[in-house]
Image: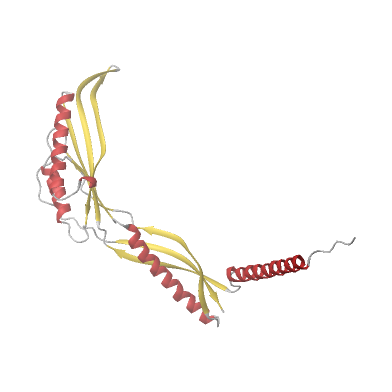
Amino acid sequence: MENVLPKWLVTGLGGLLIAFVALLVIQQSYNVKTLVKNQKPTNTISVSAEGKIKAVPDLATVSIGVMSQGATAAAVKDSNNGKINKIIDFIKAQGIPAEDITTSQFSFYPQQDWQNGKGTIIGYQSDQTVSVKVKGVDKTQDVLEKVLDGAVNNGANQIQGVSFSFEKPEDVQQEARKQAIDNAKTKAQGLAQEAGLTLGKVVSISETNSAMGSPVMYNAVASGLGGGGMDKSIAPNVEPGSQDITESMTVVFEVK
């Protein structure tokens, strides 16, 4: 007896087959379109250019220290702690927040006199350094100058200079990058014109070099020994100057 499928089942299977074939066609078409869309242009031009700007640093970092010497450990510790605490209190009074004042170095050790291979303790020495960030120095150096002068007048006998940098270096770097890309576009347009081509859209951008001037150091190194600090002084004039920020970019353009 011959097996015959019901007509409704044959019709249903036929519809499913047609739908399946249609989906395959649509998927294949989509894959081809995606491939074409993601395919890199055949004709391109690659140019490198530099962006360079000058900017005035807005952040100063000061290293302020106290060194104390004495006959007993307790006396040296108390003397050094008292001075550094007084300096920190003064700095905070100038509007510097606590998070911008960091203890960057601390040491305490005996001083020894060596004779015949044997060391005899003759005293003690303590060193403590705090790093202070002073912001907004591109607008005014008044606070920075007060901190330097007041630190000395309040017992600091080691000031290891001032370095100038940027609170948000990425902002000035981005400005230099934009200039580099603009320069690359100008350069590419000139090359394309010389070759009788038309410059098209950007295909890719990459950063090839980034350089920011080293922090500018203001040489204010000084030191005083024992319990006496440096002589009281008139506030110094400190200028942050300017720094060069350089960015090199490579840009690939489509040409027609």
Which residue is at the front of the view, 143 or 114?
Answer: 143
Q: Residue at x 17, y 59 (%)?
A: 140
Residue 10 located left or right of residue 174: right
Q: Residue at x 84, y 64 (%)?
A: 4
Question: Quick check: 117 above or below 15?
Answer: above
Give the x, y percent position of residue 179: 38, 69
Which residue is at the front of the view, 130 or 211?
Answer: 130
In this rendering, the count of numbered labels is 0
Give the x, y percent position of residue 78: 15, 29
Q: Quarter-wise, where is residue 31 in the image?
A: bottom right
Which residue is at the front of the view, 234 or 210?
Answer: 210
Residue 103 located left or right of residue 194: left
Give the x, y percent position of residue 156: 16, 40
Where, quadrant-wise, is the N terminus in this rendering? bottom right
Give the x, y percent position of residue 34: 60, 68
Residue lying farthest to the front in this orientation: 1
